[in-house]
Amino acid sequence: MEPNLFRKSRESINALCENIDSLIQDKAVDEAKKIFRRVTSKLENLRPHAEGIIQNRSVENLTFKLKYLSSQILKIKPLKKKKKAKSKVKKIPDLIWDKEKINTLKNTFLKKALLNMNDDTDSVIRFGTSGKGIRPNYQITFSNDETFVFSGSSHKTVKREPSFDNKKVSDPFDYKLIETIAGEKENS
């Protein structure tokens, strides 16, 4: 093959090899494979036209370069496709506690809450507004202005948590209302 034509073909193949190398660095597997097939085809077309020791050696060097690039392409882990954004978790709206909502609580729950109110008829109870409202945490403020937070599951006092602040509790309900609802539930 005429030396200038051979040189241009070789330089074209080398340029594509450099392009493949940069795609490998960017982990663009599909694009690198596409260009690799094109380069392989160009090299196979060039091989039969190589004449003399220098051109044959040049073709062999390009062959080794392509083998190396092929091994590098195989090592690339394809970029993970972005998963479809999951629908945002629906935030459960804050519970609104009123007489009807308190009436949905089990009688055993209400009785244990009343026990924790220590027959202090001036005490008030506030229910937590997060969760499902099945066994809500609650806080009792006694007539001496002391406030204690209780676990809705165990009805034992718990350390006041930042998540159980004044923004996450209901309006106060007095002892008499809780006693009345519990009494109605027992009689029904």
Image (cartoon, rainbow, N blue to C red):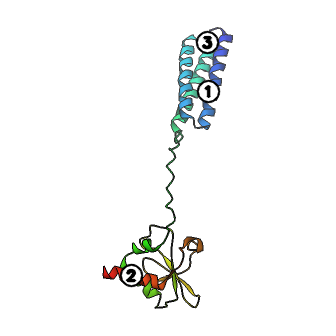
Q: Earlier in the sequence, mark 3 or mark 2?
A: 3
Mark 3 closeness class: few <14, some 14–19, many ≥20 residues within 10 Å: few
- The local crowd at label 1, few if under 14, some if 14 to 19, many if 20 or more residues have their Cα within 10 Å, is many
Q: Secondary structure at mark 2?
A: helix
Disc 1/disc 3 C-alpha distance (Å)? 24 Å
Three-letter code, disc 2: Ala
- Between disc 2 and disc 1, the foreground one is 2
Report the residue at 62% width, 20% height from top.
58
Decide: marks 2, 1 in contact (CB < 8 A)? no
Please state if 137 lies on the left or on the right of 49 as rendered: left
Mark 2 Cα-neighbour bin, 10 Å: few <14, some 14–19, many ≥20: many
Residue at mark 2 to residue at mark 1: CA–CA distance? 81 Å
> In the rendered structure, which amino acid carries the disc numbered 1?
Cys
Instruction: Give the residue drawn at x 65%, y 8%.
Output: 2
In the depicted structure, whether residue 120 falls above or below residue 64: below
Quarter that holds the C terminus: bottom left
Relative to 54, residue 92 above or below? below
Looking at the picture, how far across and down is residue 87, in whole percent?
49, 49
Q: Amino acid at mark 3?
A: Gly
